Amino acid sequence: MIFDKINKRLVVLCGHYGTGKTNIAVNLARYAVSLGKKVCITDLDIVNPYFRTADNADELKSLGVRTIIPEYANSNVDIPSIPSEFQSVFESDELCFVDVGGDDGAVALGTYADRFEREGYDMLYVYSAYRPMIRETEDAMDSLAEIEYLSRMKCTGIVNNSNLGVETDAETVKKSVEACKAFAERAGLPIVFTSAVVSVAKLLEGEEGIGEILAIKDSTKKLF
C-alpha cells in the first residue's frame, strides 16, 4: 500500500519543471481522502505562471481537502508569494501535501527546512523518463541534487510519473520502468510508486516489476 511507504505527515512533491508534480499531489490527496484521512494540500509554485493546484481547488474542497493557494494564483498578477496560511501545515494534524514548483519553489521550501526537519517529512522526486531535460540518468541526478541544495532538504523516494500525455498506454509506462530503476539505484532511493491514469492502471495490474501503482484520474490534459 502506498501509504505504508509514505509514513510522514508532511509530504513534499518536487521535481523538474513539467514532470507532473501537481497531478501527483492532487491525486495523492484524492486517494488519501478515500482512505478516510484528513488532508491538506498547499502550492509552493511561487512564480505565478506555474500555479496549477488552484485549477483543482473547487473539486478538492468538495472532497473535504483543505487547500492553501497563493493569493494571486491564476491571475494576471505576477507577484511571487507564499500564503501566510502555509505556516499552519506545521501545526495541524492533517496529512499535508506540498506541491513544489522548480527552482523557485525549492528556494521557498528552504525557508522552512528547519521546520520540516523538526516535524519529519517525506520528499518525493517526481520523475519522467520522457521529459527531455532529465531523460538521461545523470541529468535527473543533477536536477535532484539542485533541488536538494536549494531546499536544504533530502529526497526520500521517487515517483515514476513517466507518460506521453493522452498518447500514454500500458507499454509507455512499462518501458519507463527500467529507466526509473536506473535513476533510483543511482540516487540510492526507493521507487515509492508508478502512476498511470485509471484506464492504463487497470491494464498494468499484476504486471511483474511495476510495483505499487497510483491510479490517477483520467484526464484529456497533458500530464507531464
Image (cartoon, rainbow, N blue to C red):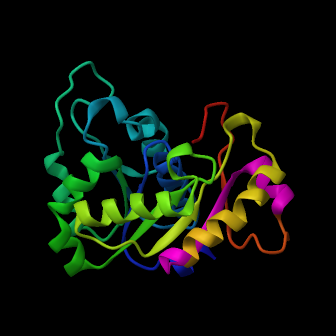
Q: Quadrant of the N terminus?
A: bottom right
The one nearer the camera, 41 or 193, is 193
The one nearer the camera, 137 or 221, is 137
Where residue 150 appears, as percent x and y from the top left, is 23, 60
- Image-based side of 38 in relation to 92, left or right: right
Single out the residue that lies furthest toward the top. 76
Q: Quadrant of the C terminus?
A: top right
Would you identify the image quadrant in which residue 220 lies?
top right
Where residue 70 appears, as percent x and y from the top left, is 24, 39
Where residue 169 appears, as percent x and y from the top left, is 80, 46
Residue drawn 61% across and 31% down? 221
154 w.r.t. 75: above or below: below
Q: Is residue 144 visible?
A: yes
24 w.r.t. 4: above or below: above
Residue drawn 46% across and 47% down? 22
- Image-based side of 224 in relation to 111, left or right: right
Q: Is 174 colored magenta in this rendering?
A: no
Q: Is residue 13 visible?
A: no
The one nearer the camera, 87 or 13, is 13
Where residue 208 appears, as percent x and y from the top left, is 83, 74
Q: Which stretch is magenta? A: 186-204
Residue drawn 27% across and 55% down? 106
- Image-based side of 206 in relation to 118, left or right: right
Would you identify the image quadrant in which residue 90 lies?
bottom left
